[in-house]
Image (cartoon, rainbow, N blue to C red):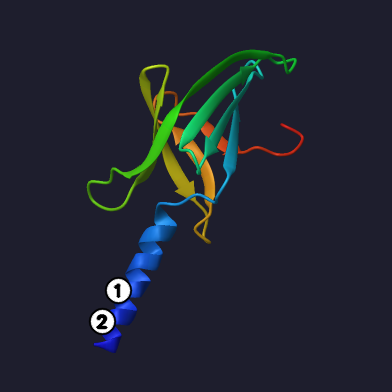
Amino acid sequence: MKQFKKIYLLFIFILFSLVSFSQGTKSFCAFDIYKSKYELNLNEDTKSITYKKYDSDGNLIQTLYGTYQLRDEGVYGPVLKVVATISGNIVKWLVIRDGGGQVQELKDESAGRVWSPCTSGGR
């Protein structure tokens, strides 16, 4: 019985770690060939998302707001995705984790753009 309880608790811990970003806001940035910057801000507490686009000079061009959730959409194994509703559109990003289980990148399903954690310098 103790062995079963240990396995169950381990399973719950792994499941919780798979579906949770760190608390607060997590920011991811991407760039296009014109050096325009895109920024996603995911707020774990409110499940809100902010999408921002900047031109190559760093001027804010567009800001969109929405909500998101994390979903396991794997058919043959676990595939965690951020599924967002932004201005009435559904957008999905594949969650890519590092060896320690931390979110390393997001990959945009529609454009194939890779989003990495934003640095303090912004680029």
Q: Is residue 29 visible?
A: yes
Callout 2, which amino acid? Phe
Callout 1, which amino acid? Tyr
Front residue of this view, candidates 4 and 105: 4
Residue at point 37%, 73% (across, down) = 10
How many residues crowd around disc 2 within 10 Å: few (fewer than 14), some, or many (20 or more)? Answer: few
Q: Residue 71, position in %: x, y?
A: 33, 43
Residue marked by disc 2: 4
Left or right placement of residue 123 versus residue 25 in this view: right
Is 12 located above or below residue 55 in the figure? below
Q: Residue 67, position in %: x, y?
A: 43, 30
Q: Residue 65, position in %: x, y?
A: 50, 22
Residue at point 31%, 77% (across, down) = 7
Asked if the residue under mark 1 is in contact with the one under mark 2, i.e. CB atoms within 8 Å, the reply is yes
Q: Quadrant of residue 111?
A: top left
Q: Residue 98, position in %: x, y?
A: 52, 54
Front residue of this view, candidates 10 and 99: 10
Q: Quadrant of residue 87?
A: top left
Front residue of this view, candidates 92 and 51: 51
Is 41 located above or below residue 110 in the figure? below
Is 58 located above or below residue 83 in the figure? above
Q: Secondary structure at mark 2?
A: helix
Q: Secondary structure at mark 1?
A: helix
Residue at point 40%, 52% (across, down) = 19
Q: Residue furthest top?
A: 61
Q: Residue furthest front?
A: 46
Number of numbered labels in the structure image: 2
Give me the C-alpha separation between circle 2 and circle 1: 6 Å
Quarter of the image with the C terminus in it: top right
Residue marked by disc 1: 8
